[in-house]
Amino acid sequence: MLPSNRLSPAANFFLLPSTSSYSPSKHGIWISRNRSPRKRRQTTTMSVETDVVPPQSGNRLYLGMDFGTSGARFALINKDGDVCAEGKREYPLYKSHETIDWARSWKTTLFSLLEDVPNHYRHLVASISIDGTSATTLIVDSNTGQPLSKPLLYNESCPDALPLVKSIAPVNHTVCSASSTLCKLVSWWNSADSNKESATLLHQADWLLWFLHGKLGVSDYNNALKVGYDPEIDSYPPWLLAQPYSQLLPYVKAPGTSIGNLKEDIRSQFGFPNDCIACTGTTDSIAAFLAARATLPGQAVTSLGSTLAIKLLSSNRIDDARFGVYSHRLDNMWLVGGASNTGGAVLRQIFTDDQLENLSKQIDPMKTSPLDYYPLTSIGERFPEADPQMAPRLHPRPESDVEYLHGILESIARIEGKAYRLLKDLGASEVAEVLTAGGGSKNEKWTKIRERVLGLPVSRAIQTEAAYGAALLALKGAQS
């Protein structure tokens, strides 16, 4: 449990107006329907939807920006959570020495998104926040903010640093992964020729926010988790502070905390008001969770994409490296998460989209399937069973494709149920309600199957875009 004196000043953030009665059709929320992967282009492509819900005269607005793996989005909301405008851009791919200059791409996209915010709304913007991909790391000059080396992306590993990190960190700590931010920092420290005395570590969201507020070296405790920050005691642990590279670590605030006013040149260039503030951000996955508006312990979000990922709001912190389970702090609660290797990728190996749609219509979701599968695309499972040798189990296959699909969908639902039971056994709050994101959330028959198997209310999350979650953090920062 968190000590009471460590709660965020805005610990009631989760009590913001609920969207339970909020209808996309009623409020005109624009959501891109094209979820298919697209080939990256050399030029930035842009899509903006404006005047979705016009604000009343004088009402303030809150801007969130999401920097994902292949592109970025913005969402502009009012104090009630209604979307007034949103848009997206693909990253322009600049080449430098035969590699992509990601830092330049992100900076260009940041300023493009700010340009995309409708002119007639900019004077109403009270605050801005940004989310970025977890463990995407930049080492920058602490005087100029310019990168001293190429950014290390979220999925890049530094196995050379892992033995050193394991020698100083507690057993099974979150940083004991070759792709952790700390491994990236240690790898740079041991190989860099740059002046280490004038270097600072920043995460992707930190660096982009710096262009807005100008105060170098500020992060949030969600992004800082994988560099070793302990959100329960609100500080870096002694074992990390004892290292020579600890001088590079950023100052950490709660997500959605005011850092300061926008720089004068940013305000004048884009027409934002003098009192507009920049607020600390978070990771893209947490921003997506915030977008679903789960607010109470026991509320959860299951993401049914290529894999099955679950996140549960809990009163207790749970970390168990055996199952890849770890917790992010959200004010006075914990977001406990885990991911299975089962999910939609298995379905795509067997059925086409048209087949999935047509066969699903013929399933009776109230009927229990006698088929017992463990759908995987390849050998190995991590959560809720930690078995690197687990083989996919998709047989016997009945003659009826309807029965086969029914069996697979129900088996994935059973795995989901086992995952939530495991989190409870590990000490997390018991799940009471499940919101659903990802492509699988559109399958109504699957939703009814999961509701029956889980024995819980299951519904589709109205908002799942991380940019919307970042906008909620901007709203939080302005209100506190």
Image (tube, rainbow, N blue to C red):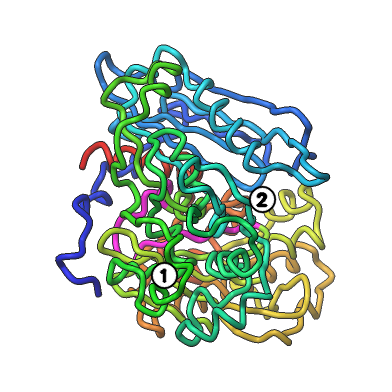
Q: State yes or no: residue 299 in magenta.
A: yes
Mark 2, secondary structure of its residue: loop
Q: At which x and y percent is residue 102? A: 67, 43
Mark 1 belongs to which amino acid? Answer: Ser
Q: Label 1: state its secondary structure.
A: strand
Q: Residue at x 48, y 22 (%)?
A: 117
Which residues, given as a range, are shown in magenta? Answer: 290-305
Q: Which residue is mark 2?
A: 150
Q: Name the foreground residue: 62 vs 407.
A: 62
Q: Which residue is mark 1?
A: 327
Q: Nearer the viewer, residue 402 or 424?
A: 424
Label placed on residue 361: none
Which quarter of the figure is the N terminus placed in?
bottom left
Left or right: 112 with respect to 45?
Answer: left
Between marks 2 and 1, how big is the CA–CA gap? 29 Å
Task: Tell me the mark number nearer the camera, choosing from 2 and 1.
Answer: 2
Q: Which circle's residue, 2 or 1, is located before the other in the chain?
A: 2
